[in-house]
Amino acid sequence: MAAKLSTCFLSHGWGSLDCKRSNGRFLAPSHRLLPASCKMRHRNFSSQHKRQQTKKVSPDLRPTNSHFQSNGDEDTEPENALADGVSSLNQGTTPDDEDVDVDSRIAIEHINDNPLKHLTVSEEMKPLGINVKSGEQLSSFQLEDLVGMLRNAEKNVLLLNQARVHALQDLEKILTEKDALQGEINTLEMRLAETNARIKVAAQEKIHVEILEEQLVNLRTELSHRGVTEGSGADMHENWNKAFDGVHSLGKELSLLRTENVSLKDDILGLKEELSRVQNTDKRVVMLEKERSFLESALKELEFKLVASQEDVSKLSTLKFECKNLWDRVENLQVLLDRATDQADKAILVLEQNQELRKKVDMLEESLEEANVYKLSSEKMQQYNDLMQKKIKLLEERLDRSDEEILSYVKLYQESIKEFQDTLNNLKEESKRRALNEPVDDMPWDFWSRLLLIIDGWLLEKKISANDAKLLREMVWKRDGRIRDAYLVCKDMNEHEAVAIFLKLTSSPKRSRLHVIHIAAEMAPVAKVGGLGDVVSGLSRALQKKGHLVEIVLPKYDCMQYDRIRDLRALDVELESYFDGRLFRNKVWVGTVEGLPVYFIEPHHPSKFFWRGTFYGEHDDFRRFSYFSRAALELLLQAGKKPDIIHCHDWQTAFVAPLYWDLYAPKGLNSARICFTCHNFEYQGTAPASEMASCGLDVHHLNRPDRMQDNSAHDRVNPVKGAIVFSNIVTTVSPTYAQEVRTSEGGQGLHSTLNSHSKKFIGILNGIDTDAWNPATDVFLKSQFNANDLQGKAENKEALRKHLGLSYADTRQPLVGCIARLVPQKGIHLIRHAIYRTLELGGQFVLLGSSPVPHIQVEFEGIANHFKGDDHIRLILKYDESLSHSIYAASDMLIIPSIFEPCGLTQMIAMRYGSIPIARKTGGLNDSVFDVDDDTIPLQFRNGYTFLNPDEQGLNGALERAFNHYKTNKESWQKLVKKDMNIDFSWESSASQYEELYEKSVARARAASHV
């Protein structure tokens, strides 16, 4: 029975350890073996899989060795040693070792150590196989030998468990490396799938190991009865050999794992090489992108040069065309001169004939006198005398006619000569102006460099003053033709005479030029919302025409009309400005708008202040424009500019005044006087006082009643009030509005502040751009016209009626226009009433405008739908630039029933286009529209119809008077139209008033600095 048990133990136990998979999982159900399981997965560890535990055999199932205890101490020592070895093994393991789960698809890269090479077969087993020959000596088989063999078996199992531990540690290292390789390829996944299959086979072999454990327990039980047979030693030896064959096969299996590890390492190295190649490719792509961007920038530069060259070619072609026209005019004048010469020759010939006739008359008179002397009284002589008298009379009449013809020819000749002389003078003056204004290009640069050296030499030799040297240098830098001519004149003179000639160029009296910088939120036509944009561009151009240097600083909005900016480019400079306690970078752009130099500031602020798709109406407008105001002053400071006047407009740039005096004047930007213009006191930009600190202003210092504290709320600041207090000049857009805002009704809470600073507060009526608003050249009109030819106005009226679908059967039917923003300020209720009243009076009405107020827009949309099919009413509820020009030109009357109007431009434009204004007497309307029926106003100033009260009765009276005048007195109406079209509403007069204010303020500042 012992032999049978031994055979069963060895055949079912160690013989089943023949693992033939590359990745095996070794599980020992006995408490003596290290409990561990290995499970692999493809990607990341799962906490659920990691918690799977291997089976653990309870110590209660361990076989009792009660039969071995009868042998005494000799039997118990091996048992204790075995128990100690197993317990020490269990103590060397950790919970981490017990809970290791490894994904079945991990590729094993390397196993550094192979613990199986330490497996040994005890020498005590060899005598076991030799003693088989003597079957009768089985009784001498000692229990110690069998225990020794069991201990060796336990050691081998321990080594197997150690090998498993090392394998698990290596697998953990592989897992760490695998986490970095996320981009493994499909081929490796297939290999790892095969590995997973092998692990499954190893899991099946776990069952055989459990059977082996049971057989060991049975073997101990059998040995306790000492019922072993003689052939049991040989069977046990054979079974041990099988067991070690299984161990040997396990070693082979591990060697296969090493081989597969090496192959996987090679694959990983290949992947790393491929990754490095991809990285090199990325670097190459980056280099190509840089090269492409460089080529694109080069292409843009070439395009810019091409545009510049095209502009030069266009200018040259224009000059050639003008030159050709001048030559044609000279040829025409020459033809006229030839004709006049021929006529003069004929006149001289007639004069000679007249002289001969006079001689004959004289002879006849002498003959008559002789006849009288001889007192010839015969009838024949009398008849002869009568005949001679008639002939003389005829000759005298003919002579008179000849004299008249000669005089007319002479007069025509004189007029032709005068016209020719005027043309020549104009050509000479134009040539002189060009010579003065344009640089001379016919001299080489060596010539100008030599002139500069001569001037510097005279300055160093104290022959000319520093101011004269500066003026002469400027003339050289500008390549002024006058200094070239002066040099050529004095080329052969001595130095003293040459210096005198050059000094004559500097002694010519010139009016001092001012340097004016406008800081504003709008400028027409690139960034226009209301009248502010028109004022900035119109006033700047007028001042520029007067010889002053004018510059403008604007925010760089993303919604500007960039096509109206010429030569727009970014400066290679980073402008830093303070805001919210730190410095922010700004990009500075430059370009020309309507011939004016403009700086555009683009903040690099995370809030993207001016990249919102709109100009105004944002929740943080106070922060947006306080940031811009400081950045604009920072630009002037860093650019080293020394302006005479800094002109800021409305609350958006009102921050400039306190910022200038509190922060920038101490830094050296102190040459300027501040002028502030408020275009509408309804908008004051008030905000909590704490927000003012963002731009660097001292809240405690400025939030005071005499400075920037709002008059209505003491915890808020008012930028407009601050500008009034800190500016040297304060203006608004009309004299009447200036008086209105000084009252409690019109001052919007600032009347007390304005009255306190009334000495520096003035109203100047705005002008209009007479080049843009000119019916004689307006490209938006079907027919251009002027005050002397009103036929074009009738044609525009017919064209507009057809375009809008209005009736055009009655050409004399009056057409009333209205162009306005539909806001309460513009008198919404009066505009609505005018629509219906015009229809009642037999006229037609056209409205162009929209409302930012939703309920007003909806209301007028309802009116538009009501009159949709009507032949006499049209409402266009949007703004259309070209249509506005057509309405001005086509309308007979234009209504402006504003509740208050700081200035107003529509009434001026309407009159320029021959449309008679019907306006309420308020603000700028009161300064520009004067009632034709008001006898208190000089006749030459009467130009429209006005009403005082902002109600329907007042509007009705003015509208009815205008209709009656139009229908009953056509000739008088035409005279009124012509008179209105000839009124000068240009910026010339307004610019002169601003110029006077500027000069007085600068003069006072200079006088104060010399005291």
Image (spheres, rainbow, N blue to C red):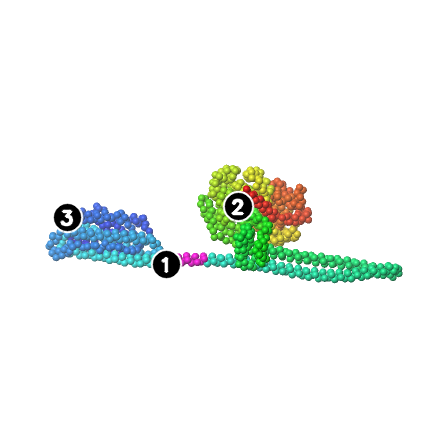
Residue 640 is covered by the magenta coloring: no
Magenta span of residues: 282-294
Left or right of 980 on screen, residue 406 = right
Residue in the foreground of this view, choosing between 138 and 876:
876
Query: Which callout, 2 or 1, points to the residue nearer the camera?
Result: 2
Q: Is residue 458 above or below residue 922?
A: below
**Residue position for label 3:** 75
Residue in the foreground of this view, choosing between 779 and 178:
779
Label 2 environment density (alpha carbons within 10 Å; few <14, some 14–19, many ≥20) = some
Look at label 1 and name its amino acid. Answer: Arg
**Residue position for label 2:** 671
Q: Earlier in the sequence, mark 2 or mark 1?
A: 1
**Residue 222 bears which disc, if any?**
none
Look at label 3 and name its amino acid. Answer: Asp
- 3D distance between C-alphas at marks 1 and 3: 69 Å
Confirm whether residue 132 shows in the render.
Answer: no
Query: For the view shown, which residue lies furthest in the left direction?
Result: 136
Look at label 2 and name its amino acid. Answer: Ser
**Residue position for label 1:** 277
Residue in the foreground of this view, choosing between 482 and 97:
482
Q: Earlier in the sequence, mark 3 or mark 2?
A: 3
- 3D distance between C-alphas at marks 3 and 2: 115 Å
Left or right of 168 on screen, residue 383 = right
Label 1 environment density (alpha carbons within 10 Å; few <14, some 14–19, many ≥20) = few
Give percent across and percent down for residue 531.
Answer: 56, 46
Left or right of 423 on screen, residue 249 = left
Query: For the view shown, which residue lies furthest in the right direction?
Result: 378
Query: Which callout, 1 or 3, points to the residue nearer the camera?
Result: 1
